[in-house]
Image (cartoon, rainbow, N blue to C red):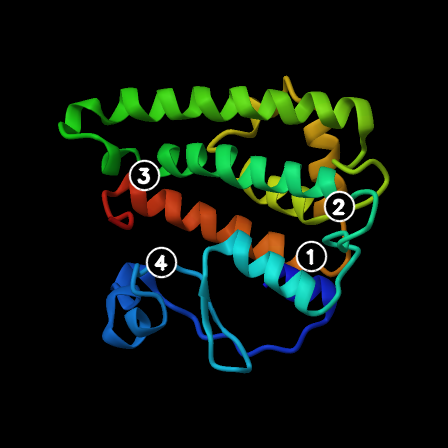
């Protein structure tokens, strides 16, 4: 949604309530057999899933070079390196933080698994912090891209933002992204969703 908002792309939103297992209905599984959200149905009827893939597809299909440098652009190589490093290393670690119970055999090991995942996420974030500290304010210097948007999404999901205190360049990048006019409402909505989900988890009602 944020990519579409940033680029003024018209789309139709179909909410899927995972708390009601709507992501497991035959209708949704026909779109994404893995049962994960989000998913995208293209104008040609193709079914796409995996958020990074969807975002990159949208950026390239709509020639959003302010989000993804085009082939031949001097920044293209660094963009691909940073984007796939972020989505291939930080994102999986963050998912293990949120869904640690899925990665253990014994329930009593969940807390330890969550801490290991958090340590891995912070270790990866330190590498990104060093890049931002040298080249910032964005990952590509003065140029905003999908890297910064994806980074801000995941860093905003930490249970405590105090964890980001050792990462000033990351915090500065996060603030710039959240302040973008077309994204402000989306981040506010995301913050509210996270608060509500955290409350459900506290009550033992989180998504399985």
Q: Could you say which disc has been placed on residue 183 in the image?
A: 1
Report crowding for label 1: few under 14, some 14 to 19, many 20 or more residues within 10 A (C-alpha).
Answer: some
Q: Tell me which label, 4 or 2, sits earlier in the chain.
A: 4
Report crowding for label 4: few under 14, some 14 to 19, many 20 or more residues within 10 A (C-alpha).
Answer: some
Q: Quadrant of the N terminus?
A: bottom right
Q: Tell me which label, 4 or 1, sits earlier in the chain.
A: 4
Q: Tell me which label, 3 or 1, sits earlier in the chain.
A: 3
Locate residue 10 relative to residue 93 in the image: left or right. Answer: right
- Mark 4 or 3: in front is 4
In this figure, which residue is indicated by the disc labeled 4?
A: 36
Q: Position of residue 176 (x, y in %)?
A: 77, 42
The reply to whether discs 4 and 1 touch (Cβ–Cβ < 8 Å) is: no
Q: Nearer the viewer, residue 178 or 47?
A: 47
In this figure, which residue is indicated by the disc labeled 3?
A: 99
Q: Position of residue 9 (x, y in %)?
A: 68, 73
- Mark 3 or 1: in front is 3
Q: Nearer the viewer, residue 108 or 121?
A: 121
């Amino acid at each position: 949604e944020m990519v579409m908002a940033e680029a003024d792309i018209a789309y139709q939103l179909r909410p899927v309530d995972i708390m009601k297992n709507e992501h497991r209905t035959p209708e949704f599984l026909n779109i994404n057999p893995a049962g994960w959200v989000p998913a995208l149905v293209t104008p040609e009827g193709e079914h796409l899933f995996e958020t990074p893939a969807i975002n990159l597809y949208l950026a390239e299909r709509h020639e959003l070079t302010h989000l993804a440098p085009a082939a031949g652009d001097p920044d293209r190589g660094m963009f691909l390196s940073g984007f796939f490093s972020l989505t291939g290393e930080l994102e999986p670690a963050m998912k293990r933080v949120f869904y640690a119970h899925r990665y253990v055999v014994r329930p009593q090991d969940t807390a330890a698994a969550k801490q290991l995942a958090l340590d891995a996420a912070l270790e990866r974030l330190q590498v990104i912090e060093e890049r931002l500290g040298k080249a910032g304010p964005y990952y590509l210097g003065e140029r905003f891209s999908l890297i910064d948007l994806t980074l801000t999404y995941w860093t905003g999901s930490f249970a405590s933002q105090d964890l980001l205190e050792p990462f000033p360049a990351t915090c500065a990048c996060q603030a710039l992204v959240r302040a973008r006019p077309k994204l402000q409402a989306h981040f506010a909505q995301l913050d509210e969703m996270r608060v509500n989900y955290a409350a459900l988890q506290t009550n033992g009602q989180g998504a399985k």
